[in-house]
Amino acid sequence: MRKTSKLWLIVPPLLVLIKDMIATLAILATEPGITAKAKLNYALALLPGSMIVDDAAPAVVVNLCLGILLGLALFLGLGFMRRGSSTSSV
């Protein structure tokens, strides 16, 4: 029986963090100032965290926490699926 890889705990939060960093760089590099349009675009880029909190920094933290929960759910779900499929074939 193969064990579930611990990469499932690391990869989703890392991907969410990279997405938020790219969104920050893209918005700040293309918008000349803080306008209402820039704020809206930045809030859309930081979804789903910007739906829960109003500011950018807490939105990144919320996204990171959601990524950690997603990774944990994938890790545990795949572990239970593999454990269940190996016992049913015996």
Image (cartoon, grey):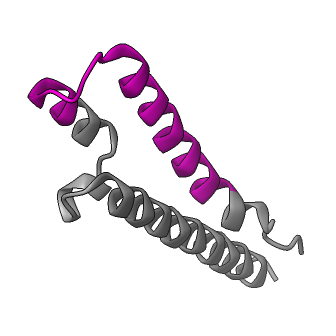
Say which quarter of the image contains residue 79. Answer: bottom right
Q: Main secondary structure of the magenta part?
A: helix
Residue 31 highlighted magenta (yes or no): yes
At 62% from the left edge and 78% from the top edge, which residue is drawn?
76
At 21% from the left edge and 27% from the top edge, which residue is drawn?
38
Residue 67 x, y percent position in the rendering:
50, 62
Residue 73 x, y percent position in the rendering:
53, 73
Q: Nearer the viewer, residue 38 or 71?
A: 38
Magenta-drawn segment: 11-40
Quarter of the image with the C terminus in it: bottom right
At 68% from the left edge and 67% from the top edge, which residue is drawn?
9
At 78% from the left edge and 70% from the top edge, which residue is drawn?
4
Residue 18 x, y percent position in the rendering:
58, 42
Vertical order, 55 against 44 (above or below): below
Vertical order, 10 against 73 (above or below): above
Quarter of the image with the N terminus in it: bottom right
Q: Residue furthest front?
A: 33
Vertical order, 88 against 45 (above or below): below
Count of numbered badges drawn on the protein? 0
Q: Nearer the viewer, residue 8 or 61?
A: 61
12 vs 8, left or right, is: left
Say which quarter of the image contains residue 88. Answer: bottom right
Residue 56 x, y percent position in the rendering:
32, 52
31 vs 80, left or right, is: left
Residue 37 highlighted magenta (yes or no): yes
Vertical order, 52 against 84 (above or below): above
